[in-house]
Image: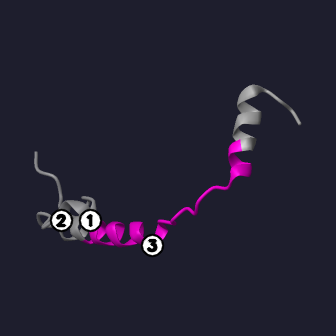
Amino acid sequence: MKRSIEGRHPADHQGPSTGVQVRQFWRIARGARQGWHRAHGRSGSSRLVQFLRIARGWTT
């Protein structure tokens, strides 16, 4: 029993993939990662005091 070609999904008519879309995805992903990175400045002593206060369970 042979099926008609017209009733098939359009993706079934495509040829084999060459990997171009995957290469483009990785090219964009690598470039975007550099744009999202943000350098953190040095934390002051007040940040350490806040961390120790929370770690010790002090509320004020």
Sequence-wise, the earlier of marks 2 and 3 is: 2
Q: Residues within 10 Å of mark 2 (few under 14, many from 20)?
A: few
Q: Quadrant of residue 51?
A: top right
Q: Is residue 7 left or right of residue 17?
A: right
The answer to whether mark 1 and mark 2 are in CB contact below 8 A is yes
The answer to whether mark 2 and mark 3 are in CB contact below 8 A is no
The image's colour scheme reads: one colour
Vertical arrangement, residue 6 with respect to residue 51, above or below: below
x 45%, y 72%: residue: 35
Callout 2 amino acid: His
Numbered label attached to residue 10: 1
Residue 43 in picture, x, y percent from top left: 63, 55
x 71%, y 30%: residue: 55
Vertical arrangement, residue 49 with respect to residue 13, above or below: above
Distance in Å between CA atoms under marks 3 and 1: 37 Å
Q: Quadrant of residue 49?
A: top right
Task: Write the start and end of the magenta stretch as one range.
Answer: 24-48
Q: Is residue 56 left or right of residue 7?
A: right
